[in-house]
Amino acid sequence: MDFKLELVPVPVTDVDRAKDFYERQVGFRVDHDVSFGEDFRVIQLTPPGSSCSIAFGKGVIDTPPGSIKMLHLVVDDIEAARDALVGRGVDVDAVEKMSAEGRPDVFYARFADPDGNTWTLQSW
């Protein structure tokens, strides 16, 4: 039996600001932006090439904004991915190399959304 992670709720304070950040700056595809009355709105976005999406909105999650940490986006070329994000106005840390004897090097570059939820680009 498969257990597939397909949706991660992300708590945000300003739904439209978060949608703009993830769609226009980070480059996620908007899959849904649906309201059910005035008290519930859900926006679902998917990173390019991913089977897992994120969702946020009004009435979606009651976790404090900024409390999601270290979501990983695995990329083939971390320098190109970082450059693309920086080019769209995302403040991405410099690429960090981590090495362990007998293991392949791993590369990381971190950034945060406007609420402080953190993401990590990862490449092998």
Image (spheres, rainbow, N blue to C red):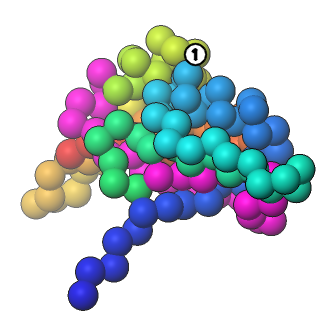
Helix, strand or loop for disc 1 = loop
Quadrant where the C terminus sits is: top left
- x, y percentage for residue 77? 23, 30
- x, y percentage for residue 87? 47, 12
Residue found at the far bottom of this picture: 1
Extent of the magenta region = 53-80
For the point 46% across and 28% down, which residue is it?
27
Location of residue 106 with respect to 80 vertically, above or below = below
Identified by mark 1, the residue type is: Gly
Whether residue 99 appears in this view of the structure is yes
For the point 50% across and 61% down, which residue is it?
7
Quadrant where the N terminus sits is: bottom left
User: Residue 36 vs residue 83: left or right?
Assistant: right
User: Residue 106 vs residue 40: left or right?
Assistant: left
- x, y percentage for residue 63? 77, 65
Judging by the rendered image, the residue that carries numbered circle 1 is 89
For the point 30% across and 31% down, which residue is it?
78
- x, y percentage for residue 98? 31, 47
For the point 40% across and 18% down, which residue is it?
84
Residue found at the far top of this picture: 87
Residue 51 in the magenta stretch? The answer is no
User: Residue 31 vs residue 10: left or right?
Assistant: left
Location of residue 77 with respect to 117 vertically, above or below = above
Residue found at the far front of this picture: 37
Whether residue 64 appears in this view of the structure is no
